Image (cartoon, helix red, strand yellow):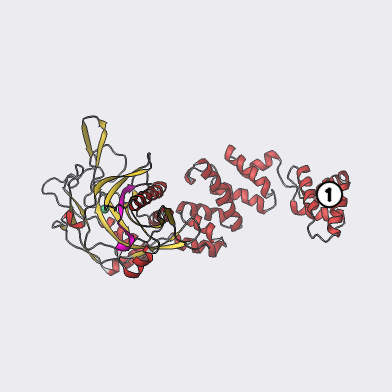
Amino acid sequence: MTTRTPYLISGRTGDWEVVMGLEVHAQVASKSKLFSGASTAFGADPNTNVSLVDAAMPGMLPVINKFCVEQAVKTGLGLNAQINLYSRFDRKNYFYPDLPQGYQISQFKSPIVGEGQVEVEADEGYTFTVGIERLHLEQDAGKSIHDLDPNATYVDLNRSGVALMEIVSKPDIRSPAEAAAYVKKLRSILIALDTCDGDMEKGNLRADVNVSVCRPGGYDDYQATGSLKKLGTRCEIKNVNSFRFIQMAAEFEARRQIDILEDGGKIDQETRLYNADKNETRSMRSKEDAHDYRYFPDPDLLPLELSRKWVEEIRAKLPELPDQKRARLVKDYGLKDYDAGVIASDTEKATFFESVAKGRDARLAANWVTQELFGYLNKEGLELSVSPVKAEQLGGLIDLISNNTISGKIAKDVFLKMIATGDAAVKIVEREGLKQVTDTGAIEKVVDEVIAANPKQVEEVKAQRAAGHEKPKTLGWFVGQIMKASGGKANPGAVNEILLKKLGL
Ligand code: MN
C-alpha cells in the first residue's frame, strides 16, 4: 500500500499546496417532492409536475415528506455521522426567475445531520479520510431555458421543490485526483443506500468545488490551529457534474490562483463557473456570506423532531455498504484487497461477481470478472447492464476451465466468440472442437513427433539440466511447440509430465 504524499504544484517562486472542500448536492431518491406530493419523474413535459406549493401560489403551505427525511437520516448513518434529533428549516432569501417563492427552504443553523467521516481509496492505492461537516435537506429550484427562443427565456418548474441533500465536507481533500476519488466514494455509498441514484448526467449528483492554495505546510498549520486562514482564500466552482471535470476544474483553478499570487495579486473570494469546452473557470459572482441571504426560520414549518427509536430502526435496516462489502469479499472469497475494492464500489458489479463466484473458484472468477469482462466493457465504453456476456454465461465458461475441458488460453478465444455470437461457452467449445486433449496416448504421439523433429534442441535441454538448471529454458520451448502442434488443445499439465518422461529428465 502506498502512502499519501503531499501533492505540490511548482510555481515560479516555489511550491504550492492545494486544499479542497466539496459541497455535493445529491437529489434524494423519492417519488415525490420535499414539501409537496408532485412527482419527481425525470423527462416529463415542462411544468407538468408542479403542484400549487411548487409554483408558490399565495397561501399554499409546505408539508414535509417523511420519506425524504428518512432518506437523509439513512444517508447520515451511511456517512458515519451524527443524526440530530432536532433540526429546523430556514428560508434562504434570494431572487432567481426559476425560484417563484423568492426564497429556498433549506436548513441553516440546525441541519438534520452533523459531523461524520468517509474513508476514500485514492487511485494510487492509499486511503485517506474526509471529514463531513454536515448534511442538510433543501429544495431544488426550477430551470431557466435560454436556448429555445432568441428573445425569451422559458421557465420549467418540474424540478422546483425536489428534495436535495447538501453534503458539506471539511477541507480535507488535498489534490484534484483526491476530489474525484471522494465524489466517487460518496456516490457509491449513496447508491448502495438507495438514497440517491447518482446519475451525474441528469444533474442528480453535482459538486461545488472549493479550492485554495497555500505554501507547503499550510494544511498542517490549519490542522494544528483550526484556522482556515492558513489555507488561503478559496474560490468555489459551482455545479461540476462529472469526475473528470471535477479534477480538471480544480487543476485549472489552482493554477489560476498560483499565477495571481506569484504576480503579487490577491485572490478574491468568489463563485466561479467551469467551462469544460475551454477548460477554464470564470467569475460568476463575488461570494456572498451567510448574512447576505437573511436566513430566518421558516414560519410555515415546525421544527423537525425525530425519536431515537425511529433513527435506530433505520440504522438496523441499513444495507451492506461498500467498505463492509469490500471486507467481506476479502474474507469470504479470498480476494485481493484491490480487486475487492473495485467490485465493492458498485452494487451491480458486486451482485454480478457474487453470482459468478458462487460455488466456483473465487479468485478465478474475480480474474475473469475484473480483468477480462470489465476490461472489455471499459474498452468498448459499455455499462455492465448491457454486457453481452451475462453472469450465468461467464460462470459456464469458468466451469469449463475448472474441470479441465479447456485451458485458460483457449478460454480467452471462447470468451471473444461468446461476445460475438451470444452463444454459451459449452456450445462454442463443442462446435469448434476446442476440448482440451487429456488423452495421454494422443499427447504422447505429438510429443514423440516434436522430439524426433528437433534433435538439436533435445541435446540443448539435456545440457541445460546437466548444468543444474531446474527449469531448462529449452523445455519451455518444447512445451510451446507441442501446444502449437495440438492447436492449443493439449492439457499443459499432461504435456509437461509426458515431455519430462520422454526426455528422460
Ligand atoms: Mn445548497
Residue beneath disc 1: 444
Q: Is residue 433 visible?
A: yes
Inspect this view and state whether residue 209 appears: no
Q: Nearer the viewer, residue 479 or 94?
A: 94
Residue 72 picture location, percent across and down: 30, 58
Q: Nearer the viewer, residue 457 or 370?
A: 457
The total number of labels drawn is: 1
Q: Is residue 237 magenta?
A: yes
Relative to 14, say whether 51 is above or below: above
Q: Residue furthest top?
A: 150
Say whether residue 171 is left or right of residue 141.
Answer: right
> Mark 1: few, some, or many residues within 10 Å (few <14, many ≥20)?
some
Name which residue type carries label 1.
Glu
- Which residue occupies 80% across, 59% down? 469
Relative to 248, does residue 326 appear above or below in the rendering? below
In this rendering, position of residue 242 left or right of residue 405: left
Which range is magenta? 228-241
Question: Is 304 in front, or is 251?
Answer: 251
Q: Secondary structure at mark 1?
A: helix
Query: Within 8 Å: ligand 1 and the Cβ of disc 1?
Result: no
Whether 158 is among the magenta residues is no
- Percent position (x, y) of residue 202? 35, 44
Q: What is the x, y in percent for residue 100?
A: 17, 44
Residue 261 in percent (x, y) is at: 33, 53
Instruction: Work out which quarter of the rendered image holds the C terminus and state it.
Output: bottom right
Residue drawn where x is 78% and y is 42% of the image: 485
Q: Residue furthest left?
A: 59
